[in-house]
Image (spheres, helix red, strand yellow):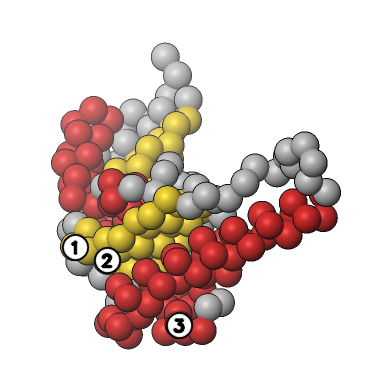
Amino acid sequence: MSRTVSVPSGRIEKWLDTYWTRHGKGAVTASGDSVTVDGTDGASASMRLLWPGVELCEDPLADLMAAARSPRRLGLLAVRADGHAVGLWDGTSVTESKHRGHYVQSRTAAGGWSQQRFARRRENQAKAAYEKAAGDVAALIEPVAATLDGLVAAGNPGAIKAVLGDSHCRRTAALAAAVPLPHLELRDTSREALTDLAVRLLSVVITIDEPSH
């Protein structure tokens, strides 16, 4: 039986202790950016970080643990049709954030509007929404972009591209290009959602295979 869990970096040592107590402490091997921890009962746990570029050397488990515990200062950007949120992560929590709702009409045209006119209005509404998001990025992330380890961007890919393509967000766009991070699914555009994005990105992803009984 196989299952995948995501364990926050601050709880990984406790998770390993529980795993070894349950399955026994077997061999530790590395392959690419993953570390596999075997149990003595036939179980195995393959561990990896979403953060790119982790180097695994002579003691791969210690290297992975050290990388997981390394504090990351992040810019956070969440954009959807109905709103956006922008924030800064200091390694443990969101320290500053801005979030706003958007109004963009649905894709179905109401009676009396030509389809072309409706589409143009909807496009203008989306453009205005993304300009507001870019303004918040310029206010929060842009001044400190050179000091950050990466930008976590989630939500609508076209919206993210529009925001980062704004001329006021050049440093933030350069940061996103320099440190490519995985695209995460977005729950909503609240401050709590920004915290969730950072925690998920910095967690250890573990695929566990347990022997069937």
CB contact under 8 Å: marks 1 and 3: no
Residue 41 at what x, y percent from top left? 33, 28
User: Is residue 28 something one can see in this rendering?
Assistant: no
Q: Amino acid at mark 3?
A: His
Among the 4 quarters of the image, the one containing residue 15: top left
Comparing marks 3 and 2, which lies closer to the viewer?
3
Q: Give above or below for 110 relative to 119.
A: above
Between 8 and 108, which is closer to the camera in this rendering? 108
Marks 1 and 3 sit apart, C-alpha to C-alpha, by 22 Å
Which mark is first along the chain, 2 or 3? 2
Which secondary structure, mark 2?
A: strand
Q: Position of residue 115 (x, y in %)?
A: 82, 49
Task: Tell whether label 1 touches label 2 (CB within 8 Å).
Answer: yes
SS for tag 3? helix
Q: Nearer the viewer, residue 157 or 116?
A: 116
Give percent across and percent down for residue 51.
Answer: 39, 63
Circle 2 is placed at which residue position?
A: 88
Please, what secondary structure does the residue beneath circle 1 have? Answer: strand
Would residue 96 be found to the left or right of residue 172 on screen? left
According to the image, label 1 marks what residue? Answer: 95
Q: Amino acid at mark 2?
A: Leu
